[in-house]
Amino acid sequence: MTTATVPSSSPPRPTEGEWAVETHGLTKRFGTTVAVNAVELLVPRGCAFGYLGPNGAGKTTLIRVLLGLTHADAGTMSLLGYPVPKHRDAALARVGAIVDEPRFHRHLTGRENLQLLARAREPAAWNRISPSLERVGMLQRGDDRVAKYSMGMRQRLGVAACLIGDPQLLILDEPMNGLDPAGMQDMRDMILSLVAEGRTVVLSSHLLDEVQRTCNAVAIVDRGNIIRQGPISELLAGASLMLQVECSDPDRARALLERTNLGGHVEVGTLGLGITLPAGTPRDVIAEVARVLVEGGISLYRLQQMQASLESWFLQVTSRLGAPE
Amino acid sequence: MTALPDVGEAGATPPAAPARTPPDRRGSWIPTGGMIATRFMELRKRRGLMVALVLVNIGIPTIFLVVRLLAHAFAPKSYGPAGGYDIFGGLVAGVMYIFGFIIAATLGCTAGSVDLSEGVFRHLVVTGRSRLALYLARIPAGLAIVVPLVAIGFTVVCAVCVFAAPTTLSYDGVSVPAGLSRVGLESWAADHADEVLCSFNYSGPGLPNVPCGNGPGGPTITGSGPGSSGQPTPAQLRAAAIQIAQQNYASYADDFLYPSDSLMIRSGLWLELEATIGFVVGLGLGSLLGQRTVSVILMVVLELILTPLLSRAHIAHLSNLQRAVVGLATAHLEPGALPFVFGGGGGGGGGGGPGPGAVSLLLPESRTVAICVIIAWLVGWTAIGAWRMMTRDA
C-alpha cells in the first residue's frame, strides 16, 4: 500500500502476503460518473480469480487503474505486494495483462510484436518468445503478419505477450472473446495450467459458465461497486434452493403449495413447477413438498433439486433479472 | 496449447530468479539499445510509408536527373548538361530542403502516434518500462531512417551534379575555362579580348572605344583615354580586356562548374538538420495529438504555407514572433552560394551568396538567434511529446 514506509531509492521487496492484488477504497471517476467506487478487492495468490460484472460495471476501468494505464482518484492498491503507483515498474515486471481486446501492429509478424514488447521488459524476456508462442499454439504462425490473424489468434498472441514476462500475476480481460469452442477449451486448460504452476490469474469476463469452470474465487462488480467476493463454493452455498417438479396438475399443485408454510416462491413454467426456497432451507423441505403434493392427489413424476449456477446467482445479486436497462 | 518447461510446467512453482540476472533498469528514462532497435524495425517495416519516403526523397530528384541526362545525351544542343552547379543549387534549396522536411515530419508523426492508434501503447505501458524511455527510443530509431534517406538522395544529386557537370563555364554568356587563377583569367582575357570587351560587365574609366559597339550585354565603358579618337591598337584592346578581367575576377571565382566539396558537405549537413527538425517536431506533434493524419497535415501547412509567409512578410509588431518560426531560422543557416529558399530567403553565409545583386527578402535574423530558435524547437517539442506520453491514459 502507498502508506507503507519504504526507501524511495529502491523498490521494497514484495511482501509475501496472501494477496496478489489488494485494493482499499479505490475510486476512479470520469467527470461526475463514478466508474470504480471505493473498491475493496482481495485476490488470493496462486488461484484463478474471476472478476464478473455486466457491461459497463467498471471491470475494465479497475484493471486499467491497477495497471497504471490511468490514474486513480482515491484509494490505495498493491500488486504482488508492491505498492503502486509508487513502485509500479517493479510490480509490473512480474505482471502480464490483456486489456480490452489484444491489439498489435498489423504490419509486423506476431513474433516481431513480441520482440517489441520483450525489449521493453527485462533482457531474459527475449529468450521466452518462442516458448511463449509454442505454449499458446502459435509457433507455426508466429512469422505471419498480424493482419492475417483471426481474433482468436490475436487473443492467443496476447496471452503469449503476457507470458514473455514470466508473470506471477496475469490479468486477462475477456480472453475468451473470439475463440471457438475448441479455442475456449484450450484457453481454459492453459489458465488452469498457469494456476497449477503457482501463478495467479485474474479473469475478467461476462461468460459466467466459463468463469465457473475455470476459477476458484470470484468478485462480482456492479455499477462500480464490488458487491460480493469469495470462493465460488462459499458464495453459491448462500444461493437459494431451487426445486423443479413435474406433476399431473401444475396449477393445482401450485395452489396446494401456496397454502402451506414452506416460505418459498412457486411458479408454473414450461418445464413444470418451479419452487424457489430461501438460502439455508433444510433439505427436509423437499420431502415435505413431495408429501403435500401426493396427499393432495397429484401424481408426481419428478422432483429434482437444481444446482445453483453462478449465472443464476449472479443475476440474483446484481438484481439485473428483468431490470430495465 | 502445450506446456513448455521454459515458460513453466504444470505442477511446478514459478521459476526462481536466476542468481545472476542482467540489470533491469526499466524505471530508467534512458532507452536501451534493444528498444531502439525494435522501434527502428517497427518503423522500417511500414512498407507503404517507406516506399513513399524513398520515392519523394530519392525518387523525385533521381527521375529529374535521369530525364536531364537522357535529354542531354540525345539532344545536347537543345538541353544542357544534367549536372552542374546551378542544378545542384536548385535541387538542394528548391526540392530536397522542402521534401526532406516533409518526409521526416511524416515519419515523426507516424512514430509519435501509431502505438496509440494501433492499440499497442497499453501493451508497452504494462511492461513497466518508463514511458519517457519509450518515447525517447523513437528519436534515434526514426533518425536512423531519416538521416540515411536524406543522405542517399543528396548523394545521388551530388554525384550527378559533379560527374555530369558542364565542361566549360558560361560567364556573362561567354564560355570561359573554369578554375582559372587571376593571372590565368587575365591571360585568357588577353587572348579573347573581343569577347571580353563585348560581353563582360565593366564599370570604370580609361578604356578605348570598343569595336563591337557596346550592344546589349556588352561592357559599360565610360570615359575616354589618350588616343580614344582613333581605332585602338590590338595591344590597347588586350590591355583593356585584362583590366576588365581583373574587375570581374571576384565574380568569376564564385562561379563553378560543379559544387565544391565544402559546399556539398555544408549543404548535406544543412539538409540533415532540416530533416532532424522535421522528425522531432513531427514526433512531438504526433504524440500530442495522437493522430497521424492531422499531424502530417499540420506539418505540411507549417512548411509550405506558414513558414514562407511568415518568413517574408514584415509585420511591424510581430517580427520577434516571426523570428521564432523554425523554418526561418534554418533558412538563415543556409550555406552561402545556394539559391534562396522560400523564394527569397537565406544565403546569408559566406562564399558569395546566391549571386551578385541578389537580395534576401527574409526577415533579418542573426545566426545566434537562429540557432537558439532551432534548439528551442527541438527541446520544446521533445518535452511536449514526452509529457503527453507520460500523462496520457493508455
Image (cartoon, grey):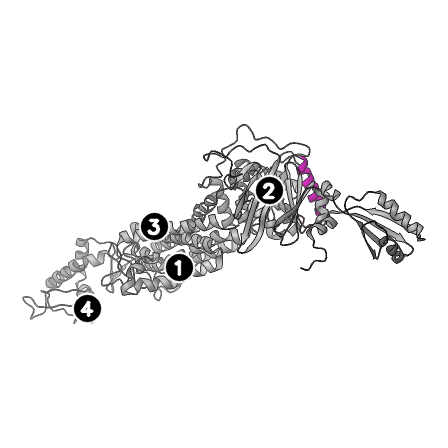
Determine which of the numbered discs, if any, sits on residue B218 in the image.
4
Cα gap from disc 4 to disc 1, whole angstroms:
34 Å
| Same-chain check, marks 4 and 3 | yes
For mark 2, name the chain: A
Cα gap from disc 2 to disc 1, whole angstroms:
52 Å
Magenta stretch?
A175-196
Determine which of the numbered discs, if any, sits on residue B65 in the image.
1
**Amino acid found under the numbered disc labelled 3:** Ile
For mark 4, name the chain: B
Whichever of labels 1 and 3 marks the residue nearer the N terminus, that label is 1
Q: Quadrant of residue B82?
A: bottom left
Say which residue appears at 11% left-offset and 62% top-offset.
B235
| Same-chain check, marks 4 and 1 | yes
**Amino acid found under the numbered disc labelled 2:** Cys
Whichever of labels 4 and 3 marks the residue nearer the N terminus, that label is 4
Whichever of labels 4 and 1 marks the residue nearer the N terminus, that label is 1
For mark 1, name the chain: B
Residue B339 at x, y = what percent?
30, 60
Q: Quadrant of residue A230?
A: top right
Q: Where does label 3 land, which residue?
A: B375
Mark 1: give few (<14), some (14-19) or many (20+) Cα within 10 Å: many
Residue A30 at x, y = what percent?
54, 54
Q: Residue A261 or B146: which is nearer the viewer?
A: A261
**Amino acid found under the numbered disc labelled 4:** Gly
Residues at discs 1 and 3 in contact (Cβ within 8 Å): no
Q: Where does label 2 land, which residue?
A: A162
For mark 3, name the chain: B
Residue A184 within the segment the image draws in magenta: yes
Task: Check disc 3 and report its element: helix, strand or loop.
Answer: helix
Cα gap from disc 2 to disc 3, whole angstroms:
40 Å
